[in-house]
Amino acid sequence: MGKYNPIGIFDSGVGGLTVVKSLLEELPYENFIYFGDTAHVPYGNKTPSELFSYAHNIIKFLMANNVKAIIVACGTHSSITLPVISTEYSLPILGVVNPGAIMATNHSKNNKIGVLATQATVKSLAYTKAIKAINKNCEVYEVFCPEFVPLVEAGKLDGEATELAVAKYVQPLKVLGIDTLILGCTHYPFLDEVIGLYAGGDIKLINPSYTTVTVLKELLAEKGLLNDEGLAPQRDFYVSGDDSSFFRVGNLLLDNIIEKVAKVNL
Ligand code: DGL
């Protein structure tokens, strides 16, 4: 394993591209393989046993492609499968929940933190536990937002349907007086303009992607696996289901960096 080996990244669909965005800024020379499990999107309504089965198949696929580390670019898997799978494989596997919790607790002044996430993530209380492990005085309010993932997967980042959904999910958190709001599903930062507008200037939005990539950078540097050589990176995109919609929406979200999407059956 060396520094030119790719980083593996996965999510149910285009949501993990928020992590790719941060990766392109912070680690622009890294090769990576992105897997969007579009045959199973959305993950938010899946059971833990379904999620474990998807995670094992995807990790095996990424390992067969010689990845040096994996980012679970998905709040749902980071909440439910990551604590187990990170102990079962020999390579580093990182998620987005702890970085999100660290960013939120660093920012909050009134210790009232809101979390928008999928149903499965909210049910797991992973964000509440991670935040309280850092600061037990924090009050954490989690809301699940089933309408967001279909909107993002369809590329509907604004417009009436998006605004109505945002109002529905964010209003109860505004009433509770939060000063910090974690976008706890990796799809949601693509809606940050509408969410930010509705939440207002007093509520800071937290996108866990930035810190997640920083944690990865430190880890790769420690292991001598950081690729900072300025060679043109190889960026491969795979999906398990719909590839044309991933290609279209992914390029809308990532400013046309996706050259092709390959479909694989795991
Ligand atoms: N983007 C993922 C997450 O962060 C999956 C969302 C979904 O497919 O429901 O939870």
Image (cartoon, grey):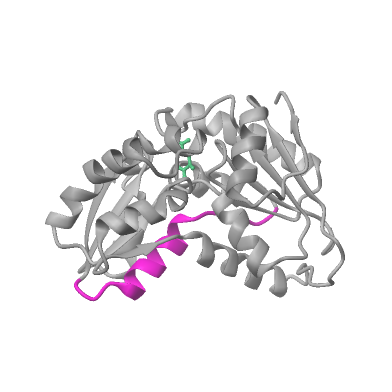
Across and down, in percent, residue 86 comes to 58, 50
Drawn side of residue 59 relative to residue 164, left or right: right
Seen at 67% across and 36% down, the residue is 247
One can see residue 25 in this view? yes
Q: Closest to the observer: 36 or 92?
A: 36
Direction from residue 125 to residue 221 in the image, left or right: right
Residue 254 horizontal/vertical position (percent)? 62, 51
Assess whether residue 100 is covered by the magenta stretch: yes
In the image, is residue 78 above or below residue 174? Answer: above
Q: Position of residue 164 (x, y in %)?
A: 27, 39
Residue pictured at 64% horizontal, 36% vertical: 248
Left or right side of 17 for 64: right
* Residue at 60% in and 58% down: 21
The boundaries of the magenta stretch are 91-110
Question: Total label count?
Answer: 0
**Which quadrant would residue 223 be assigned to in this image?**
bottom right
